Image (spheres, rainbow, N blue to C red):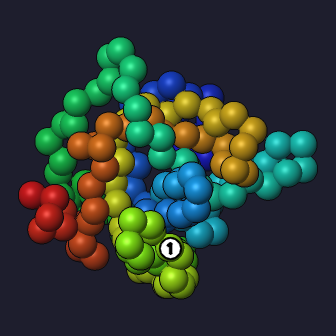
């Protein structure tokens, strides 16, 4: 997708990848793939192999089609050739009276996911070239075989 921006700009797509989160004062969510076959390079800058997920709604937002496990599994198989799940760090908090206080940083496992939404070019922030705008009901966690995670059914 990154190697064919004009083809996918403003298109409705299903994207499979590693679901990552960046948790801080503002949370960011991404789909990523390591060592993308066609990285996006503009003016010598190599963009990260990530698509940022924006939760939002706009007129004409697509409804989730019937997700075919065989199609998802084949897409996930391609991503898994270059990408490991790994983990990301998230802050931990606890209640202290009427306050919530930071306690520690913890490694949290990443997940495989499929997101169905509209692709748009990203504003020049967070070193991501694309954004997928999706409703929460169009973001699905996946098992290793490409089937939806039990909590998704």
Tell me the quadrant of the picture where the C terminus can be found: bottom left
Front-most of residues 147 and 81: 147
Circle 1 crowding by C-alpha within 10 Å: few under 14, some 14–19, many from 20 = few
* Whether residue 31 is situated above or below residue 105 in the rendered picture: above
Residue appearing at x 49%, y 34% in the figure? 119
Q: Is residue 7 left or right of residue 145?
A: right
Residue 43: x %, y % from top left = 90, 43
Q: Which residue lies furthest to the top in this view?
A: 59
* Whether residue 62 is situated above or below residue 145 in the rendered picture: above
Q: Does residue 128 appear anywhere in the picture?
A: yes
Q: Is residue 38 left or right of residue 76?
A: right
Residue appearing at x 40%, y 32% in the figure? 56
Tell me the quadrant of the picture where the N terminus can be found: top right
Q: Which residue lies furthest to the right in this view?
A: 44
Q: Which residue position holds label 1? A: 101
Residue 31: x %, y % from top left = 48, 57
Front-most of residues 50 and 81: 50
Front-most of residues 105 and 135: 105
Q: Is residue 117 left or right of residue 84?
A: left
Where residue 140 sits, quadrant-wise, is: bottom left
* Whether residue 22 is situated above or below residue 61 in the rendered picture: below
Residue 64: x %, y % from top left = 22, 37
Residue appearing at x 75%, y 38% in the figure? 124
Residue 27: x %, y % from top left = 52, 55
Q: What element carries label 1?
A: strand
**Total marks drawn?**
1
Q: Does residue 3 appear anywhere in the picture?
A: no
Residue appearing at x 48%, y 65% in the figure? 20
């Amino acid at each position: 997708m990154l190697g064919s921006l004009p083809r996918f700009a403003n298109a409705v797509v299903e994207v499979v990848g590693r679901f990552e989160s960046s948790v801080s004062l503002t949370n960011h969510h991404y789909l990523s793939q390591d060592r993308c076959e066609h990285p996006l390079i503009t003016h010598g800058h190599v963009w990260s192999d990530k698509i940022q997920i924006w939760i939002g709604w706009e007129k004409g937002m697509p409804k989730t089609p019937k997700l075919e496990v065989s199609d998802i599994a084949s897409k996930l198989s391609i991503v898994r050739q270059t990408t490991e799940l790994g983990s990301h760090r998230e802050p931990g908090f606890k209640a202290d009276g009427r306050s919530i206080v930071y306690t520690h940083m913890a490694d949290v496992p990443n997940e495989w996911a499929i997101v169905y939404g509209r692709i748009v070019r990203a504003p020049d922030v967070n070193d991501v070239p694309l954004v997928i705008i999706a409703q929460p009901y169009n973001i699905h966690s996946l098992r290793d075989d490409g089937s939806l995670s039990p909590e998704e059914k």
